Image: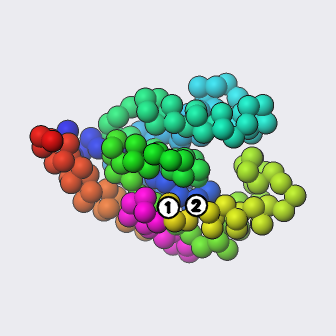
Amino acid sequence: MNTADVNLYLVGFMGTGKTTIGRVVAQKLGFALLDSDHEIERQQGRTIADIFAGDGETAFRALERQFVEGGHPTQRMVVSCGGGLVVQPGMLERLQAHGVVVCLHASIETILARTLRHRHRPLLNVEDPEVQVRALFAEREPVYRRAGTVILTDARPVNDVAAHVVRTWRREAGEFARAARSPA
């Protein structure tokens, strides 16, 4: 595999900037951007909230697994992954087998400021969304921390974060491509 073709997967908690940063990074790399949640909505013909309400979280997680295993192009993509995608057993390893994984991270205060005003997030449609965010963050943070290079997005301009992501991708894509070319 050519280094310039290696996919980039952005993971992290909701509200860390995966889609916003992904858009800028894709433009800088000349890649297409795919948002796993939007792609699942497109494939299913309904919103994530509708999938959660009608079929449950387990069904949605199965759709995420299908997306990772074969529902997207394997080269020249920046993929913004839903916040819970890498938390599922085996999913982080699947992403790492497909390309470079970078984790965007923000403080709980930043995440709360970015997410509590949005009602389209099914996991926050509860009586006390702040308690839910804090609990999910505490549960998921250990997985995010081992997901790949962690880049902080708190109080940083989008272009600075995007430039950091591109530098990280360039370094790690070379390593990924060499490993993919070498016989096992």
> On the image, numbered disc 2 is attached to which residue?
140
Place residue 41 in its image quadrant.
top right
Secondary structure, mark 2, is helix
Q: Residue at x 47, y 45 (%)?
A: 91
Disc 1 to disc 2: CB gap under 8 Å:
yes
How packed mark 2 is, by other alpha carbons closer than 10 Å (few <14, some 14-19, many 20 or more), is some
Residue toward you, 99 or 78: 99
Q: Residue at x 78, y 31 (%)?
A: 54
Give the Cα distance between marks 1 and 2: 6 Å
Res 118 seen here: yes
Res 78 seen here: no
Secondary structure, mark 1, is helix
Which label number is shown at residue 167? none
Percent x, y of residue 169: 31, 56
> On the image, numbered disc 1 is attached to which residue?
144
Q: Residue furthest front?
A: 89
Place residue 14 in its image quadrant.
bottom right
The kind of residue on which mark 2 rests is Arg
Percent x, y of residue 142: 52, 65
Percent x, y of residue 61: 60, 39
Residue toward you, 55 or 50: 55
Query: From which residue to which does the magenta span run?
Result: 145-157
